[in-house]
């Protein structure tokens, strides 16, 4: 049974339209703090602070904290914890990079992300920046798993490759069941810990270019990768020669090709 605590005395109800599930399990903020390791040496962005269960723990570390929250019903709760100028209201995915606060120290990012927008938020950081030192997000367990598994794992997917091209990823040590949240979701949750790779804009573009080919392959993940490439991109290159040069088996499926091999194959 999960241990419970009150992040606030508010009886504010979660909004289904925002995918809200408020954390009531103290193990979750404890694990996030352990993996994020914030201190006064860092700027921290928390996305979706909700009622502030994690926010209080971060503030206790002395980190320079900025909050991003879409639900303005939480204003009274969050403004008791943080100055108004340290809170940005609205949909994080709709904010342009130039509208984001400029971190004064190395950046850490964390949050209990709604399941419908968790992957888009992570992709936004990895593809467009800014590039944090570390990110720790609570996500649907299956998503966190797929984002962190290696080649040849049964859950290896486009998301696995996409994540690996931009970050070192691993899944947290705990799985949290529905009873860890209010209202209770129908799925389990886990932490995804990401350490983004520092790279030039030119290198980032190389990886983004590779993704259009990788996406096409995983759309037909059970098909032989070489056959799919020859059929989908017939005029691009001599795929047989490329496979041979890189030592990739001509009968390999997408799930048998590593992120490193994909990057070499498509650049």
Image (tube, helix red, strand yellow):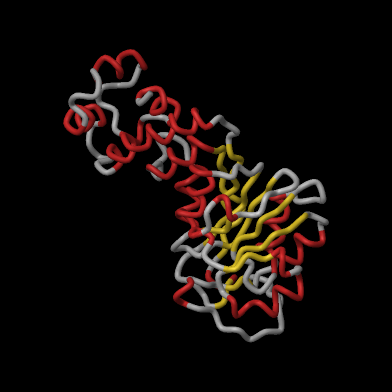
In the rendered image of this protein, does residue 244 appear above or below residue 218? above
Task: Tell me if I can see residue 194 in this picture.
Answer: yes
In the rendered image of this protein, does residue 264 appear above or below residue 46? above
Q: Residue at x 70, y 73 (%)?
A: 78
Q: Residue at x 29, y 28 (%)?
A: 252
Q: Residue furthest front?
A: 98
Nearer to us in this view, 124 or 201: 201
Q: Residue at x 57, y 50 (%)?
A: 98
Image coordinates of residue 222 in percent, x first then y, are 25, 40
Image coordinates of residue 210 in percent, x first then y, are 37, 32
Q: Residue at x 49, y 37 (%)?
A: 164
The quadrant holding residue 8 is bottom right
Nearer to us in this view, 77 or 250: 77
In the rendered image of this protein, does residue 11 appear above or below residue 253? below
Nearer to us in this view, 261 or 48: 48
Quarter of the image for the C terminus: give it: top left
Number of numbered markers: 0
Q: Residue furthest bottom?
A: 11
Question: Is residue 200 toward the left or the right of residue 6 in the image?
Answer: left
Question: Is residue 166 toward the left or the right of residue 109 in the image?
Answer: left
Quarter of the image for the N terminus: give it: bottom right
Image coordinates of residue 129 in percent, x first then y, are 55, 44
Task: Tell me if I can see residue 140 in this picture.
Answer: no
Image coordinates of residue 23 in percent, x first then y, are 62, 70
């Amino acid at each position: 049974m999960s241990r419970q605590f009150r992040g606030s005395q508010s009886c504010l109800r979660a909004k289904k339209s925002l995918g809200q599930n408020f954390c009531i399990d103290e193990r979750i903020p404890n694990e996030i703090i352990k993996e994020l390791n914030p201190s006064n040496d860092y700027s921290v962005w928390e996305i979706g602070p909700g009622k502030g269960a994690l926010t209080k723990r971060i503030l206790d570390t002395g980190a320079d904290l900025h909050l991003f929250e879409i639900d303005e019903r939480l204003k009274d709760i969050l403004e008791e914890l943080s100055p108004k100028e340290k809170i940005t209201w609205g949909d994080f995915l709709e904010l342009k990079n130039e509208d984001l606060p400029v971190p004064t120290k190395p950046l850490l990012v964390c949050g209990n992300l709604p399941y419908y927008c968790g992957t888009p938020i992570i992709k936004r950081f990895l593809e467009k920046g800014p590039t944090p030192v570390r990110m720790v997000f609570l996500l649907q367990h299956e998503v966190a798993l797929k984002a962190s598994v290696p080649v040849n794992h049964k859950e290896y997917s486009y998301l696995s490759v996409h994540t690996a091209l931009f970050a070192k990823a691993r899944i947290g040590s705990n799985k949290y069941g529905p009873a860890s949240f209010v209202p209770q979701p129908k799925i389990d949750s886990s932490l995804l810990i990401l350490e983004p790779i520092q790279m030039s804009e030119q290198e980032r573009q190389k990886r983004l270019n590779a993704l259009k080919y990788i996406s096409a392959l995983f759309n037909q993940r059970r098909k032989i990768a070489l056959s799919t490439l020859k059929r989908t991109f017939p005029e691009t290159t001599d795929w047989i020669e490329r496979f041979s040069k890189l030592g990739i088996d001509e009968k390999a499926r997408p799930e048998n090709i590593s992120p490193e091999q994909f990057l070499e194959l498509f650049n």
